[in-house]
Image: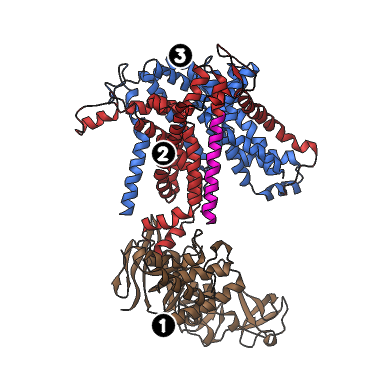
Chain colours: A blue, B brown, C red
Amino acid sequence: MTRALSKIYFVLIGLFLALPMIVVAGVSVNEKQTLAFPPKGFSLSWYGEIFLNPEWRSALFASLTLALASAALAVAIALPLAWFLWRRIAPWANIFQILGIAPFTLPPVITALGLLTFWATTGFYGQPWTAVVSHAIFFVTLPLVTLSLGFTAIDRSLVEAAATMGADDRTIFRTVVLPLILPYIVSGYAFAFVLSLNEYIVAYMTVGFTMETLPIKIFNALRYGYTPTMASVTILFVATAAVIFSLVARFGDLPKLLGAMSSDDT
Amino acid sequence: MSGLALNNVTKEFGTFTAVNNVALTVPHGTFVCMLGPSGCGKTTLLRMIAGLELPSAGTISLDGEDITQVPTHKRNLGMVFQSLALFPHLTVGENIAYPLRIRGAAKEDQVKRVADLLAMVHLGGYADRPVAKLSGGQRQRVAIARALAISPKLFLLDEPLSALDAQLREAMQVELRQLQQKLGITTIVVTHDQREAMTMADTVIVMKGGEIRQAAPPIEIYRRPADSFVADFIGSTNLIAAEADSAGRVSVLGQAVPGISLGSGMKTATLSVRPEDVHLTAPGDGALSGTVTFVRDLGGTIETFVDMSGQRIVAVSTPRARPQVTVGQPVGVVLQPDVCVVLAK
Amino acid sequence: MRREAPQRFGDYAPLFFPATMLIVFFVIPFATMIAVSFFQRQQGGFYVPAFEFSNYQRFLSLFFANVLGFSLMLAVAVAICCVLLAVPFTYLLTRMARKVQIVWLVALLSVLSLSEVIIGFAWSTLFSRTAGITNLLVMAGIMSEAKALLPSFGAVLTGMVYQAFPYTVLVLYPALVRLDPTLTEAARTLGASPIKAFFTVVVPALRNTITATLIMVFIFALGSYLLPQLLGRPQHWTLSVLITDQAIYQSNMPFAAAMAVFLVLVTLGLVGLTILAGRKGEAA
């Protein structure tokens, strides 16, 4: 009986999570420019619209560029920091760990406003690269957490073994540490990439008036008239996120990344 | 019938058969040890008795009542887990009182029962301690007291002593056996430690590959193993291939061994000879011939490794009874008929 | 490898880049925001350095007290709903086969990464008259005609629970997945039904985790800025919405900054109080 109850509970939660996406997917295949559900007619033209309509295409391009660049910068900030904290005993350096986790933990509007005042004060407000830096800082938490986890999983005797064979610190990092930490770099990058792709408020407050990312474009479209393209973009986003996280799960140990013991232990 | 009975119990996990068609009766008040290598199905069998796994086939009955479908919490049993599973958010006393509280016992009865149980496991006055502050042996006792709180019909223990160091483990084995005899409770322990099984059990059950290979009192398992797996798993032994000719004369490695018979109709068999039963003499003399390859002097005992045409025989003796041998020296090996156990191949 | 304290100046080298980036682009902007909150606003959206409390004094009105009260109440409601839904869900999830867990985790991560814009759009569609869930109910014959379910408080709450639920599960997941499964088995052998075991063992053993999760989800929900606008009426707007509104549309940066600083202080204060209360509860 308990088993049946828990099954029902899972179905209900699954429905709750999926229902909005089902409706949006339905809307995205409407034939005419209406927001009807169940859809009237069937057409995939609203998916084509993302790539054919110059406004949507440039928003897609802007979002992809921003996500690719800011995720890379976030990893570039997180990797040396996580490595240093693992390699050295320097309690005061933990302050940077906290600083790295704070932007993502605080209400996003605060980080966004802080960056807005900063860019406005320094006179760079509206420059596209400021969005890259802003997102990198906002999402540095994700690679920092995955990398810290990855470093604790490295057996320190491997490093000692490499040292006995004549490798110096730099060589050890390149030949032993880096290959072991690579899966965590990839997943940290993937997390930052997907979240950057979806981020609205930081992007809006820093470059909202000069550049349209996809979430900004959707929001603007929401205010100035509906179009099923919003629905097709939404589905594209969900699908992208699902594919990327599935890849992380396929090539890495997703439960472990999220805090479970490694599957070898259990 | 009073006691526990398993009737042709099978458990499959997907395509893997963890327990295969096991039949077993455990009379009331017996202490049973289930022994076997890891993956032999002993823990699965215990978990089915506890109701934590449902059998794929077969039934389990307790005191004549079919309990196969009875959920765990209605079986009125006590179980000690390998991890001990002490509740970290409760004190020692609250842990022990848990089964009483769940059953709605009056507060003052709970307090009294907890005090009695703590006295029984020699932890009087520990009721208010947090479990995290206890030593390994103390945690062990708390887990035992908690399992016995409701005076269960069945006391189950899954590798209960494996986390303790060797000295403490031996002491707890004795204590556990004495406790069980005092309470007269039907007890089933899963272990991979044969010394533990020999110390505590009325009946030892040796399992392999999901099946029971032998169920018998410890000394019988040792003296009369049912097959070569049991012979090898319990204690150490020499397993030697033997052949009989048409007249029934038995030979080992091409050398005749008088006085042994393999039983009617058997052409080949395996002889199991415990190392302490192997006698070394001077070569010739009617004995099998071999060469000493290694001598391990452990002070109290001496192990001599002898090579007999590629087969290694280990002989154990006390220093006083030892013949003077050195590595490379030829020796005679005597297999007395009364110590050879003949096992089907 | 022995972890050692940095010996030479060069040992600090890996720290330079991350430290610089975090200080320049997080600490300084944060400080800038605090500074701006004391600045004086000029007409036309500019502001000049000053040191005055006028921006903070504006809070002392019934309007802001209401907005603050509503924001906190909404965040608490979201946190409680999410934790109530997520604790049993996550517990059951962690007892499942690893493969099943991975499928659910991928789905949860996908929903978690969704932009608030998209969540708002999806739910506004779902609650709309033309394309909403009521159409399904009409089709099923439960309702006679489709109607819009928004804007309403229920819509805001639903959208925010949807947004925060995956986050709640992922915050709970590590503690629950590491919870010794034999604890509940032991409870069952000791006479507790599975449901009783959940409430007498799992929940109490995770008391601290659950408190921490409530705080985390509370902060997460405080940050929601679009859903109240897209799914609610103006009286459902939260402090986050007002901050955005002041910064972008009213061009009153000093006031927006003051509200942001205030939000941080309120957040930290409530978190501190909760932790303090938790400590006292444990000591007693």
Q: Is residue B188 above or below residue A19?
A: below
Q: Position of residue C237 (x, y in %)?
A: 43, 27
Which sits in the foreground, A42 or C271? C271
Q: Can you identify the residue that label 3 sits on?
A: A55
The label nearer to you, 1 versus 3, is 3
Badge 3 density bin: few <14, some 14–19, many ≥20, Cα 10 Å: some
Q: Residue at x 72, y 84 (%)?
A: B324
Badge 1 density bin: few <14, some 14–19, many ≥20, Cα 10 Å: few
Separation (CA) of disc 3 from disc 2: 39 Å
Q: Are marks 3 and 2 on the same chain?
A: no
Q: Position of residue C139 (x, y in %)?
A: 21, 30
Q: Can you identify the residue that label 1 sits on?
A: B264
Q: Quadrant of residue B130?
A: bottom right
Labelled pair 1, 2 in contact (Cβ < 8 Å): no
Q: Can you identify the residue that label 2 sits on?
A: C77
Labelled pair 1, 3 in contact (Cβ < 8 Å): no
Separation (CA) of disc 1 from disc 3: 95 Å
The label nearer to you, 1 versus 2, is 2
User: Which structural element holds mark 3?
Assistant: helix
Badge 2 density bin: few <14, some 14–19, many ≥20, Cα 10 Å: some
Q: Which residues are magenta?
A: C261-284
Q: Residue at x 27, y 21 (%)?
A: A41
At label 3, which amino acid type do we have? Glu
Q: Position of residue B239 (x, y in %)?
A: 54, 75
